Image (tube, rainbow, N blue to C red):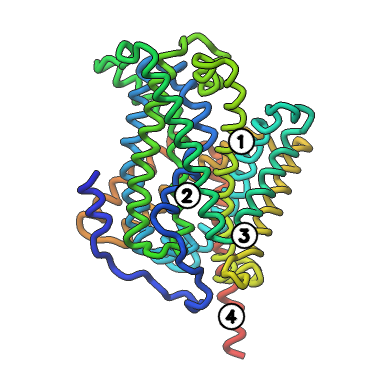
Amino acid sequence: MADAYREIAAEAPPPDDSGENSDTDRLRGHVRLPGAIALAVTIVVGSGALVLPGLAYQKVDDAALLTWAAAAIFTVPLLLIFAKLGSTYPSAGGVAGFVQAAFGRHLAAAVEVLLLGTFGLGIPGIALTGGNYLVALPGLGALPAQAGAALLIVLAGGVVVLGVRMSTRVQVAFAIVLTVALLAVGVLATASGAAVHHLPALRIDTVSDGVKATGVVFFAFTGWEMLSFTTEEYANPRRDFPRAVVLSFALVVVMYLLLAWGVQTRLPRDATTELASPVQALVATFSPAAAHLVAALGVVIIAANLVGAIWGGSRLVMSSAREGLLPAPLARLSPSGNPHRAVIACVTGFLLVIGANAVKLASLTGLLTIAGQNFFLLYLLCAIAYTRLFRAGRRAYGIAVTVVLGVIAVSAFGAAQFAYAAALTVIGVAASVSRTSRRGVSSAS
């Protein structure tokens, strides 16, 4: 990993600043390494950490530990691509900014619309998951989950509106709480049981079973793509973005492996109810009276997720408005340099989707499924952009990752998913071409 980091941090070509906006429109670089690591951890570690260890254990028994290890290994090539792109082309456009540097404005607009269609479903889905945890707290049982989700969205949006410094402080606090809590659960679970007896046997069949189940837990390793939308706010993105990716990844992997090992050490595989909420079940094995605290921990984790997601999503909206894809007022900054209008627009859109869920027009499963598959397509787009932007060995590496991701997408995704993504892409290209045509006519006149 150290060699990989040195490759990432190596001197790189300068970013493409061919956009029409001046540096005066750019966000201020306040975020330093501790805040960047905290933001990464809170974006990545979400509801999956509370559920997926149990699902993987149910599926492949003690080989589940190998499943988590394999998912971590498979994630490394993607993170190397994100780290290199993010440090070389830092912007509020994130993935869209990478595509713009590689292929120009029209395709970047297509990616922006694809991203808006992804965030617009995935972030409300996360909030609805948090709403379910919130109403499980004592005294809140009568509150509808949708109302709880809306409350979490509004509170998270309020934190982001207060500005980067406040958001960073909140994320650092959230990161400390959830990291310490989840690491403590994992350490206590492995230390108080015969953990060594639950290590998977390194046989061909066991390793094969573990690797085949990787798809079950891969969702827990998504989120670093959201981090790419915050790079414009780094004090030193070239240095700190790769470090934030590498250090947060190491921390998250340790956390996941300890939780997975603790689950298969302390819980029986046929305990369906307990494995549906494995962290709560683990806590109950140490202290049944403290098990209800897991609901509070779930709310903290989802709240942290939402602050990071709205932070990243609002920067996408602001960037798209700067480029003319969305209304120009959404790009305006507050006196403190915060895109408050973009934050409010995001919160409003997310509340509308939560409302659609409340009236049965959108299911939680559907929201998370479509968003998750779109995020995978965004990984693929980043690999393609990486292949275009870098040469020699890096280009060969990018091609290899692109081919692997392309094969997975073609074999795993249905026609409806591709149709949705294609429709968003066409809308983005058409909007960008139309805007360019209007500008050309205006200039000629």
Q: Residues within 10 Å of mark 2 (few under 14, many from 20)?
A: many
Q: Mark 4: which amino acid?
A: Arg
**Observer-nearest of 430 and 35:** 35
* Disc on the earlier residue, 3 or 2: 2
Pointer 1: what residue? 299
Q: Disc 2 on helix, strand or loop?
A: helix
Q: Please name which of the two marks, 4 or 2, marks the residue nearer to the observer.
A: 2
Q: CA distance from mark 3 to mark 4?
A: 36 Å
Q: Which mark is residue 439?
A: 4
In the rendered image, which quarter contains the C terminus? Answer: bottom right
CB under 8 Å between callouts 1 and 4? no
Using a 10 Å C-alpha cutoff, classify the residue at mark 4 as few (fewer than 14 neighbours), some (14 to 19) or many (20 or more): few
**In this rendering, the label closer to the viewer, 3 or 2:** 3
Residue where numbered disc 2 is placed: 39
Near-viewer residue (37 or 92)? 37
Tell me how far mark 1 sits from mark 4, CA to CA.
47 Å
Mark 4 falls on what kind of element? helix
Mark 3 and 4 residues: CB-CB less than 8 Å, in contact? no
Quick one: label 1, few (<14), some, or many (20+) residues within 10 Å?
many
Q: Nearer the viewer, residue 101 or 36?
A: 36
The residue that disc 3 covers is 162
